[in-house]
Image (cartoon, rainbow, N blue to C red):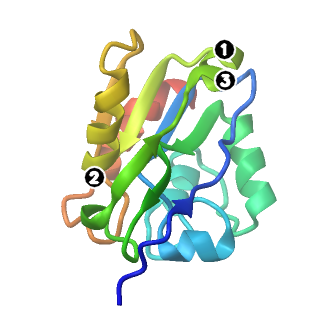
Amino acid sequence: MQDTKVKMGFPPVYDENSRVLILGSFPSVQSRKVSFYYGNKQNRFWRMIYSIFGEEYSEDTEKKKAFLLKNGIALWDIATECQIEGSKDSTLKNAKIADLTPILQTANIQKILLNGALAFQLFETKYNMIGIPYLKMPSTSPANPRFSVEKWKEVLDDLR
């Protein structure tokens, strides 16, 4: 039997110093278990981003939040609630698209990075005329065989 219950995402992480907004699609099962973004230890996101900034990786959620804010990064998911089977983006349906207004009114977001194809697709359904540069990035998911840390480094270079 499929679980068709609506699942909720997490609140965004940002402050007035955030300059880059990274948007994923929706939290995985592992992320929902730990109640924070990219909770699957196989996901490349945290190790990649810490490495790009030359900092030692921490599994502590509060330290991750502090790391993001210190480096001018806002983090959220483009779908704030949806129906999804497991963690597969291909099963995501009935997504409620995030209202980015509070972040954009608080922070000086200069670019938006969409972590993977679905995040990019969902973002464009509501924000394709946003007026802020946005880019589809290689998904950090362990299911993505075409992941490229070089693309992420290049795009985040101005924050380092």
Residue 5 place in picture, x, y as percent: 49, 71
Going by the numbered disc 2, the residue's amino acid type is: Ser
From what the image shows, is residue 140 above or below residue 117? Answer: below
From what the image shows, is residue 52 above or below residue 143? Answer: above
Give the residue number, with chain letter if any, for mark 3: 102
> Residues under labels 1 and 2: Cα distance?
31 Å
Q: Which residue sits furthest bottom?
A: 1
Going by the numbered disc 1, the residue's amino acid type is: Gln
Going by the numbered disc 3, the residue's amino acid type is: Pro
- Which numbered disc flags the more N-terminal residue, 1 or 2? 1
Q: Which residue sits furthest left?
A: 146
**Looking at the rendered structure, which numbered label has been put on residue 105?**
1
Image point 54% across, 76% down: which residue? 30
Q: Foreground: 72 or 34?
A: 34
From what the image shows, is residue 9 above or below residue 17? Answer: below
Give the residue number, with chain letter if any, for mark 2: 148
How crowded pointer 3 is (Cα within 10 Å; few <14, some 14-19, many 20+) is rated as few
Would you say the residues marked 1 and 3 are in contact, meaning their CB atoms lie under 8 Å apart? yes
Please tell me in which quadrant of the rendered image residue 119 appears: top left
Q: Foreground: 1 or 133?
A: 1
Task: Locate the C terminus by quadrant.
Answer: top right
- Which numbered disc flags the more N-terminal residue, 3 or 2? 3
> Residues under labels 1 and 3: Cα distance?
5 Å
How crowded pointer 2 is (Cα within 10 Å; few <14, some 14-19, many 20+) is rated as few
Would you say the residues marked 3 and 2 are in contact, meaning their CB atoms lie under 8 Å apart? no
Q: Foreground: 84 or 17?
A: 84
Q: Secondary structure at mark 3?
A: helix
Residue 49 place in picture, x, y as percent: 52, 50
Q: Foreground: 51 or 17?
A: 17
